[in-house]
Image (cartoon, helix red, strand yellow):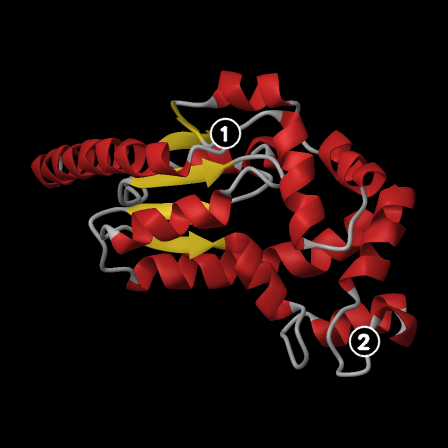
């Protein structure tokens, strides 16, 4: 029985809400990584005319759509936080579409390694097995709240509710192969990204050589 083809060397980047995942991912992309943001893909499939919208409309009704036809994310967030069954129904619609789109993007990637940005990587139960290493972006919880409050209309109680639905900080750190500190010192981000990027490029080369030798 033949084995399935090995995936390219990949990093799973994760962190709690407000940890700075997008900022850090953009820095890796600027250095040559192929970054695939699953949260951005989720927005795409639930946007106006997105692939998930016909099923979302059929399952939840027009009241969960914005006037332009996109999913009303604020209203849907309230529903899935209060109704676990609704959360499952939404995930059954959205997750397969995210996975197909993610795999298509990965197959077309040309960077020196793949970096998947997955907000709920630890919580998913499957992503950790799909990547070569897990990189956690870490910062104090009070800083998470301040950042989210500054960029959105969510108040502290709403942000804490989202955080409580995510893996605890200690759980994320325990699952990490690598940790990048994003505690507000912007000047410290660049050197951390430079060091990790060089390390990942080296690992990716070794990974590719080993793969060829086993063909």
How far apart are labels 1 and 2 at the CA level?
A: 35 Å
Residue 97 to residue 58: above or below: above
Q: Residue at point 67% right, 68% down?
A: 46
Residue 126 visible in the displayed image:
yes
Q: Is residue 87 left or right of residue 124?
A: right
Q: Position of residue 202 (x, y in %)?
A: 14, 34
Q: Residue at point 23% right, 55% down?
A: 111
Residue 86 to residue 84: above or below: below
- Residue 36's disc number: none
Q: Pick the residue in front: 124 or 184.
A: 184
Q: Position of residue 7 (x, y in %)?
A: 31, 44
Q: Is residue 187 left or right of residue 149?
A: left
Residue 79 to residue 162: above or below: below
Graded by Cα atoms within 10 Å as few (under 14), some (14 to 19) or many (20 or more), the crowding at tag 2 reads some
Q: Quadrant of residue 210?
A: top left
Q: Residue at point 76% right, 80% down?
A: 69
Q: Position of residue 36 (x, y in %)?
A: 42, 55
Q: Quadrant of the C terminus?
A: top left
Q: Pick the residue in front: 47 or 57.
A: 47
Which of label 1 and label 2 is nearer to you? 1
Q: Is residue 122 left or right of residue 148?
A: left
* Element carrying mark 1: loop
Q: Are marks 1 and 2 in contact (CB under 8 Å)?
A: no
Q: Residue at point 76% right, 69% down?
A: 71
- Residue 183's disc number: 1
Q: Quadrant of residue 125?
A: top right
> Where is mark 2, residue-wise?
66
Q: Quadrant of residue 4?
A: top left
Graded by Cα atoms within 10 Å as few (under 14), some (14 to 19) or many (20 or more), the crowding at tag 1 reads some
Residue 75 to residue 62: above or below: above
> Sequence order check: which comes first, mark 1 or mark 2?
2
Q: Position of residue 155 (x, y in %)?
A: 81, 45
């Amino acid at each position: 029985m033949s084995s399935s083809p090995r995936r390219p060397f990949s990093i799973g980047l994760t962190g709690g809400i407000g940890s700075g995942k997008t900022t850090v991912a953009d820095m890796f992309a600027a250095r040559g990584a192929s970054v695939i943001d699953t949260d951005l893909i989720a927005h795409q499939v639930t946007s106006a005319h997105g692939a998930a919208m016909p099923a979302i409309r059929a399952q939840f009704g027009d009241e969960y759509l914005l006037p332009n036809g996109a999913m009303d994310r604020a209203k849907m967030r309230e529903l899935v936080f209060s109704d676990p069954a609704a959360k499952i129904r939404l995930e059954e619609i959205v997750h397969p579409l995210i996975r197909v789109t993610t795999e298509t993007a990965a197959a077309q990637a040309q960077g020196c390694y793949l970096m998947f940005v997955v907000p709920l990587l630890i919580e998913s139960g499957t992503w950790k097995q799909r990547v070569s290493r897990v990189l956690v972006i870490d910062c104090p919880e009070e800083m998470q709240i301040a950042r989210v409050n500054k960029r959105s209309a969510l108040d502290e109680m709403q942000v804490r509710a989202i955080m409580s639905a995510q893996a605890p900080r200690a759980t994320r750190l325990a699952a990490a192969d690598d940790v990048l500190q994003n505690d507000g010192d912007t000047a410290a981000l660049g050197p951390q990204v430079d060091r990790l990027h060089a390390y990942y490029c080296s690992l990716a080369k070794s990974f590719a050589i080993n793969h060829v030798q086993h063909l």
